[in-house]
Image (cartoon, rainbow, N blue to C red):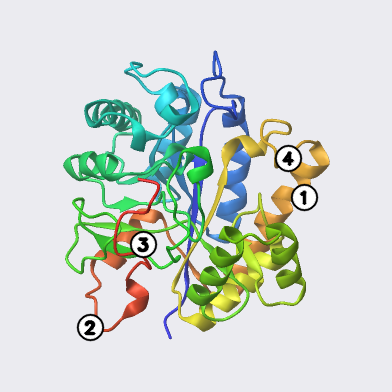
Amino acid sequence: MSKQQVLITIDTEEDNWRPFAPDPTTRNADAIPALQALFERYGAKPTYLVTYNMGENTALAEFLRDRQDSGLCEVGSHCHPWNTPPHKEEHFLKNSMLLHLPAQLVDAKIRNLHYLLQGRLGIAPKTFRSGRWGYGQNVAQTLKTLGYRVETSVTAYTDWSGNFGPDYSGMSPQPYRFDEGSIYDADPVGSMVQIPATTGYLQRNFNRRARIEQIVRRGRLNQLRVIGLLDRLSILNRVVLSPEAASAGSMIRLAKRMNREGYRYLNLFFHSPTLVPNLTPFVRTSNEKRQFMERIEEFIAFASESQMKFVTASEAGQNLLGYVNRAGDQELRPLVSKVPQAF
């Protein structure tokens, strides 16, 4: 059995948590060098997915360029449409999702972000994540023309439709190759690869657990009470591979379960504003910041001690794009065969 590979994808974004906040700031950029130093102690290579505002931060751009040139990280694109020119859309929550904007406007925004980062970093980005996970067909078309190889907006087993976003609740954490014309269908010769942000279960057979969770959430029963009961009975323990949402122990148990289930890629993710207390809901105090950093370090120390391989998103993409799908290999296909209902 091959070693698990660990990606660390960081939404490297402005301080303002809510879309359309006036006068966005980038104070959290000052906390990124200390985070990078932590990763370097363990040989971890993060992928910083950078927004337009953060790309305009000269000190951060210079720091990331130096680390990327040294092979210590990757810099990709993270498009917050509300803070990316051209600003032609109305400011309401639905329009914070790229998937709802006209294709021509989406194309212009992604291109502006892409060329800003290319100019600041000297290398064209190859990895992309939509702001607020709002990925769609219009996004993929532009990514293909710009030469992107990795897309990582899918959050496994997660439904964002309550916030005008996509419904990924039927999609597993398994990466797959795809063609820009059909973004949720695995294509063994597709030119891009989807590497979902990892969510899974502590029990075997993730797809079956996801279906149970969907039945509960869409039924008339008291959803939270039933899911809480299933969690206590160790029937349905759902874990998000993020230090913002899970303990280090839970993330480690998930990684072990995924290894037993045959998942070769783990995609740990979080937001850079969480590095500064009171910018996100996940860290409100300096003590919570310390605990947050401890969760990150405990997990990457475990990964290092377990001889997992740390890779950037592009390195993982190169590996996956070189892989030929075998007939009957169901784990290489997403659980859905068409665009989710949210679209």
For the residue marked with disc 3, what is the amino acid? Answer: Ala
Q: Which residue is mark 1?
A: 291
- Gap between marks 1 and 4 measured at Cα: 9 Å
Instruction: Please identify the quarter of the rendering in which residue 323 is found.
Output: bottom left
Q: CA distance from mark 1 to mark 2?
A: 45 Å
Picture coordinates of residue 143 (x, y %)?
24, 42
Q: Secondary structure at mark 4?
A: loop
Looking at the image, tell me whether mark 3 or mark 2 is earlier in sequence order. Answer: 3
Which residue in the protein does label 3 denote?
A: 316
Marks 1 and 4, the one that precedes in the sequence? 4
Q: Residue at x 38, y 68 (%)?
A: 335
Residue highlighted by disc 2: 327
Quarter holding the C terminus? top left
Query: Mark 4 and mark 3: span between their CA atoms?
Result: 30 Å
**Circle 4 crowding by C-alpha within 10 Å: few under 14, some 14–19, many from 20:** many
Residue depth check, mark 1 versus mark 2: number of the one nearer the observer: 2
Image point 66% across, 38% down: which residue? 275
Q: Secondary structure at mark 2?
A: loop
**Amino acid type, callout 1:** Gln
Marks 4 & 2, CB-CB < 8 Å contact: no
For residue 42, above or below residue 138: below
Q: Amino acid at mark 2?
A: Ala
CB atoms at circles 1 and 2 under 8 Å apart? no
* Percent coordinates x, y for residue 269 in the rendering: 54, 51
Question: Could you say where residue 98 lies in the image, as x and y percent from the top left?
Answer: 36, 34
Q: Where is residue 156? Give x, y as percent.
A: 48, 60
Q: Quick check: 292 left or right of 148?
A: right
| SS under mark 3 | helix
